[in-house]
Image (spheres, grey):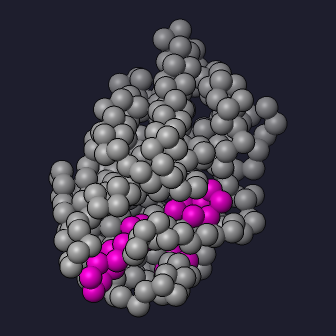
Amino acid sequence: MARRAFASSADLDEKEQKLEVLADGVYALTADGDPNVGAVEGEDFLVCFEAMATPVAARDWLAMLQEHTDKPVRYLVLSHYHAVRVLGASAFDAEVIVAHENTRALVAERGREDWESEFARMPRLAKAADSVPGLTWPAVTFSDRLTIDLGGDRGDLVLQYCGRGHTEGDVVAWLPKHRILFAGDLVEAEAALYTGDAYHREWASTTLDRVKEFGAEALVGGRGAVSRGREAVDAAIEQTRDFLRVMIREVGAVHDAGGTLKEAFERTHAALNPRYGRWPIFEHCLPFDVSRLWDELSGIERPVIWTAERDREIWDLLQD
């Protein structure tokens, strides 16, 4: 394989953003394979889901949202800790920032390193990087489920932990009234998976099983288009599961045979590329994905912290 530019460092073209109204007061912003965000109206407030990478990028999203509603943001929900999802939080002026308790612990443990790593990997998303005031700290955390009463006849928004997956702290946001699920990076709709901080076997089995049990009629994944209808929702979940299972099979075969990490990367790339190679961030993610899975199969339970230096070392090792 020809040597590629590091991660997404060469992906500098702006993506077309699309704001969709999924139901009365339920919004999703998708962006041609860039991270998705969402918002839900309460009776007199907003709940926003994901914060984008920088306050400047977040203000662009909020300006689009304000064309539909002028309600203030009461809750900002973070699906997990990754920098491109959380560092724009200050722009929302939210009364409460909510995340899983494991997410808060991950920010404390590796938030600074992740910030430097992700901004180097995806410089285009780091719009006005100097506008970030510091790490984003959730004020409210939970372990299993947290329900937000939206007021009036708007029903509830249920925040649910489904198990370890993309990270050890991912949560989803479920609107039972509309049967709409914001799945974060636990599900991608025709976008490659980033699994550098993942628990692959748990994600591919019990965690995705729990996501599927919601029976959503519409699903907003971490990237890609909104999935509408049960067939499309289930397809997105099963595409995600298949990507993970192919990785587990191919990396596992090389690992069991006493091969090398580079051999595992090359074999996994060959197996995934025919179906998934055209999807956004496929080439970016795969070296980090295979490295983490190799560690997991080697008995390293928790993901090793990614730093900007370690990113380059793994990239150079697998791309040479």
> What percent of the width, then of the height, locates residue 294?
48, 27
Q: Quadrant of the C terminus?
A: top right
Residue at coordinates 53% horizontally, 9% vertically from top-left? Answer: 257
Q: Is residue 69 left or right of residue 161?
A: right
In the picture provided, is 221 more to the left or to the right than 77?
A: right
Residue at 79% x, 32% y is 1
Q: Nearer the viewer, residue 263 or 15?
A: 15
From this view, report whether residue 3 is shown above or below residue 218.
above
Residue 248 position within the rendered picture, expressed as x and y whole percent measured from the top left: 49, 24
Residue 39 sits inside the magenta stretch = yes
Total numbered labels: 0
Residue 91: image location, x then y, percent: 43, 83
Please give the range of residues in magenta: 30-57
Q: Is residue 298 left or right of residue 52?
A: left
Viewer can see residue 168: no
Residue at x 34%, y 88% (from the top left corner): 72
Taking the spot 19% from the left edge, 63% from the top edge, the residue there is 147
Residue 244 place in picture, x, y as percent: 49, 31
User: Looking at the picture, does residue 61 appear above or below residue 234?
Assistant: below
**Outermost residue toward the top?**
257
Of residues 286 and 223, the one drawn nearer to the viewer in this rendering? 223
